[in-house]
Amino acid sequence: MGSLVRRPVFAVLAVLILVCLSLPLGAAAQRLPEGAYQANRSHDYDLLHLKAALRVDPEAGRIAGRVTLDLTPRVNIERVALDAFYLEIDQVAVDGEAVEAQYDHHTLTVPLGKSVAPGAPIQITVEYRAAPKAGMYFQRDPANLDKIYITTYGEGGLHANWLPLYNDVNDKFTSEMVITVPEGYTVISNGVPVPTDDPRTFHWAQRDKPHSNYLMALYIGDFVRGELPSVGDVSLSYWVPPGYLEQGLFAFRTTPAMVESFSRRFDYPYPWGKYDQIAMPDYPVGAMEHTGVTGHSASVLRGPGAPFDFGGPTFDEYSTDWTAEATISHELAHHWFGDNTTCRNLGHIWLNESFASYLMMLWDEASVGPEQLAFDAELARRHYFEYVAREHEIRPLEYHHFDAPDAMYTQPITYLKGAATLHMLRHELGDAPFFAALSAFLKKHQFGNVESHDLKIAIEETTGRNLETFFAQWVTGAGAPQLEVSYRYRASGEEDGGMLDLQVNQVQPLVEGQGYFDLSVPVVIHAEGPTGRVVTEHRLAVRGPSSHFLLPVAGEPEMVSFDGAGHLVARIDFPKLPEALRYQSQHDALVGRMRALGQLARRYPTRPETVAALTAALDPKNFWALQAEAAQLLGTVRTPAAEALVARALGAEDYRVRKAAVLALPHFGTPSAIASLLRQVKDPHSDVVGTAIVALARAEPELHIGFLEEQLQRDAWFDEIRIAALRAARELAQPRRSDLAALAALVAPYAGPAYNQDARQAALEAWEAAAPDDTALHQRLLAQAEASPYLLQKYAIEALGRLGITAAEPLLKTFVEERRDPNLVVLARDALGEIDRLR
């Protein structure tokens, strides 16, 4: 195996990462994102029911048929404006009578022939054809290119590309889909199935409860159905491509328990009649919570030996926010928060996404335990603060200045910071009041549209607490506090101990949207008194730039834990001496223990207390995340004693601990570390293997291309090892290598349709790194920007701008001018600007 490596090279990546993460958040200017103000959309009618009867031609990528809209005016109206993007309109009728409608490719204006009063019924029928370029996606199955799978995705106003309708979230209606497809295709949609006389026609009806337009769904393809145990009257099913029933059962096996858990938590039963889950090849987004039917990337399918991860694998961390369990529970959670209570506009989308993200943590708490919840919240905070340090962007959870919907779906803010904020609010209110308030919110606003203020009022009415300050700081306010904490112990000279003088300074930048925070902070003190160890707990009110607290203690403190349970969304700098950190790493709550280990590794890498603390943390009796944290921190310590401990971590039973140890190895820069990485390429778990492959490329820039050729042939869950080899190729594509052309030739075939979109994107990234001027790469990007899986389409548009490909300008201008998809409009506009800059 040594022949695969040309020469050892010392790794510096860990040092660079640590330097970046150690910078204070104020080291670069923080800002609010810019964009047009987005208000609630006005509409002068209410859509009551939509029925679509459509024929779908998968091979041609076309649909044709009729949509019937039942609506009623809010005010006196003489015409109805429907959103309709580039449909081929054949006929429009009002209450059965044909009319001459006006159409400009975006708005279909239907004359009513008279003034119609509020509340009067109107029925509009539109017959049309379409070849949707957004909102409805026709994709060939990478595993079988003869099969086509079709799905819809409507967030951000995309459904108007295949349906004429009112295309915003602040109206709710019932719906039906009557879909005719070629033989061999199955259709799944919202609601319950209605029998038909034609086996090629599928009729689904969501008639009992209203939902927003973006929650309508079609899933069309070659599916087989699996059943899960029902929960009361709610039937639970999953639909997967043939041959995957067993993997589907394993992936979705805990869904019934999730339904029961959330129904109990909020004293509000699952509100829809059934719940279907679909696994789709090359799904346009990771997952989507359509009413009563959720779509998932096929990466959700797995057996017991697969990683916990969902979607494209990560090789940079030992864990992810988005495990398969987390994603499944997140999408289910939307059926309480999002599908039931729906934000009135995207400026309030946190009411959908922050809640679903916190509920997935609540499921971890119920299914694994409180330490898993604590770790989830800590990981969310880390990723949020890393995002702020990298992008310098702070944004309130509720925000109305954006150009593209994607700007409001920023995961580190809307999902992760939002979930951590709800976790903080839970501990501020207490468990019983918190969940009682959310139950009251659901019941008061069920099947309606909501804003942040509605949640605030529901909590205040339930708990009697005034939440003006909390919402001003954490919902409509931006950023988060950065705290510098220190203390002095003052002995009294008597046997009754002394006083702890604790000081807390807020040092975050005072910029627009972010000021000083009012915080309620739990502090736990361990002190050795005359009769033994005394544990005291305090809740401190931190206000303004500097707060001082005098706390009685039994003796000199062994541990002062400031938010050790991890309730605050805050950066905390609390320097301590090695012995105090070692004690904390063994006696605090999980988050405090992890933070103590991190400070030991970064501030005192050569001290014996550090190795002793890391050794203790690696004990298999500890919670898995503490073990993994210790294993990865060994790469920060980088001493011979630390490298010896890595071998212990590489033998851990939990693959995530072994993965963390692999992440540590490149930072030692020793031949023995390289040898260990080569051994881990044969680990029994594909996630460890993939991480070792990428780590080798980072540690060994001269890694032989033949090594990658071998790894690209290895099959694994969701092509994980293949994706790892492609990402390793990107790492190796440095200007000083002499075989860049060969590297580009190696990865280029994996950008083709026979591989899933995550593998294809990894191939494109490596290809771009190795041969950015390759005209074959440019042609591939042009083709994928025009028509490909949605995530690849976005990547291709950005890459065309980044590479300055002038041949892309006509296509990019079409995206901007046609305005079918606001996300692609902004990406194309930015790409055109970059091409012009590089010209």
Image (cartoon, grey):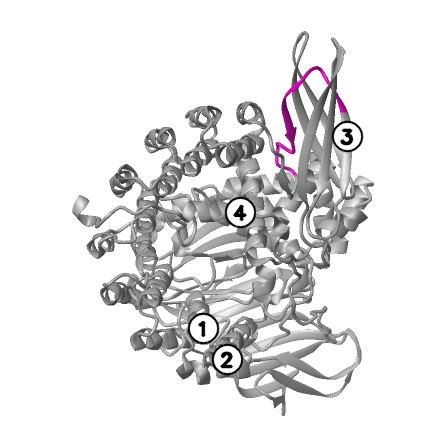
Mark drawn on residue 549: 3
Q: SS for tag 4? A: helix
- Mark 2 to mark 1 CA distance (whole Å): 10 Å
**In the image, what residue occupies the spot 50% across and 80% down?**
815
Looking at the rendering, the stretch of residues picked out in magenta corresponds to: 551-567
Residue 478 is drawn in which quadrant? bottom right
Q: Nearer the viewer, residue 169 or 357?
A: 357
Q: Are marks 1 and 3 in contact (CB under 8 Å)?
A: no
Quadrant position of the N terminus in the picture: top left
Residue 799 is drawn in which quadrant? bottom left
Earlier sequence position, callout 2 versus callout 1: 1
- Mark 1 to mark 4 CA distance (whole Å): 31 Å
Residue at far bottom of view: 100
Quadrant position of the C terminus in the picture: bottom left
Q: Nearer the viewer, residue 752 or 401?
A: 401
Q: Is residue 444 visible?
A: no
Q: Amino acid at mark 2?
A: Phe
Tell me the crowding category of disc 1: few under 14, some 14 to 19, or many 20 or more residues within 10 angstroms, Cα based.
Answer: many
Residue to which mark 4 is pinned: 21
Q: SS for tag 1? A: helix
Residue to which mark 2 is pinned: 815
Q: Position of residue 760 (x, y in %)?
A: 34, 63
Q: Is residue 593 visible?
A: yes
**In the image, what residue occupies the spot 41% across and 67% down?**
792
Residue to which mark 1 is pinned: 797
Nearer mark to the viewer, of 2 and 3: 3
Mark drawn on residue 647: none
Q: Is residue 24 left or right of residue 241?
A: right
Earlier sequence position, callout 2 versus callout 3: 3
Residue 63 is drawn in which quadrant? bottom left
Q: SS for tag 3? A: strand
